[in-house]
Image: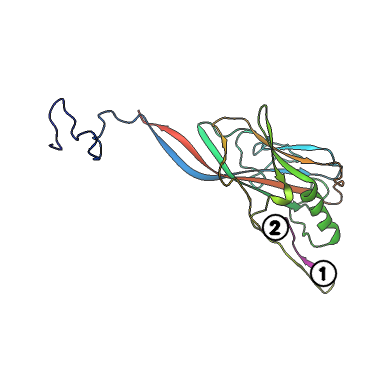
Amino acid sequence: MSYYGTPGNLAIGVGTGQVPPVPFDQPKNLFRFGEQSLWSTQLHQAGAIANSSFRLFSTPIGQQGQGFTNALTIAETNLKEGGRVPAGVAYDVFGVACQVALSTNAADVGGTISQSIDTQATIQSLLNIITNGVLSWDFTQTQVDIAPVNLVGAGGGAYGAVATGNAVNAGQMNNGAGHVWLYRKHPVALPGSSTFSILLRYGSRAAAVANNSVFCRVVLLGYYKNVIEIG
């Protein structure tokens, strides 16, 4: 059979295993894929956290919320709209990380997120969060538990032993530079413009936050797909 075909006949015979002819109609849209992370932060100022629940991914950049007195900046979140995946983008989450740090102050006024975790008191503050905290997905009508915080790795950062010299402690500890929590087979699908958040929940045995505010940043690792209309 001729590859050029004849009027009324297929260019390539059915069942021949050859590539089918190019369709006459132009495509109406294209799919664009990419990898991206989304993050959001909760600040625990000094006070009780036992039996409490805190909602992350609800406050966008430039607004106050999630325990912060001042507006959230790019270090705290990259959400443009609280609680929503960007319009027109479907986002699949294949990993979750949770990073814990301490402020130099008990409140979000005059403090910076740079307190070394290198003393008994600061290490206890870290352990209080990662031992008693649990992360959960919160959708419109459904909540799905992810894991305790101590199983959700920070994914990187300064960590490990502390060094002491000349009566000065230097070092940093966190919940590890270990692996993030991975959805190995089935990522969590967040359709475009869907509403979601992540809850940071504590049991009854969590101690109160004292002396230094605690910074908890949750990072979602995933890939997106959006449709580009071309016709």
The N terminus lies in quadrant: top left
What residue sits right under mark 1 in the picture?
A: 168
In the rendered structure, does residue 172 fall within the stretch colored magenta?
yes
Q: Dot 1: few (<14), some (14–19), or many (≥20) neighbours within 10 Å?
A: few
Amino acid bearing label 1: Val
Q: Is residue 33 left or right of residue 129?
A: left
Helix, strand or loop for the magenta stretch, by majority = loop
Q: Residue at x 73, y 51 (%)?
A: 150
Asked if the magenta segment contains residue 124, the reply would be no
Residue at which label 2 appears: 176
Give the structural element (helix, strand or loop) at label 1. strand
Q: Which residues are magenta?
A: 169-177
Camera-nearest label, 1 or 2:
2
Question: Which quarter of the image is occupied by the C terminus?
Answer: top left
Instruction: Give the Cα separation between the discs numbered 1 and 2.
Output: 23 Å
Task: Pick out the residue farthest to the top.
Answer: 8
> In front here: 25 or 17?
17
Side of 204 where 140 appears, left or right? left
Q: Residue furthest bottom?
A: 166
The number of callouts visible is: 2
What amino acid does circle 2 point to? Gly
Question: Residue 206's image quarter?
Answer: top right
Tell me the tag on residue 149. Answer: none
Residue at point 77%, 40% (across, down): 201
Of the residues under marks 1 and 2, which one precedes in the sequence? 1
> Residue 47: where, in percent of width, then height?
86, 43
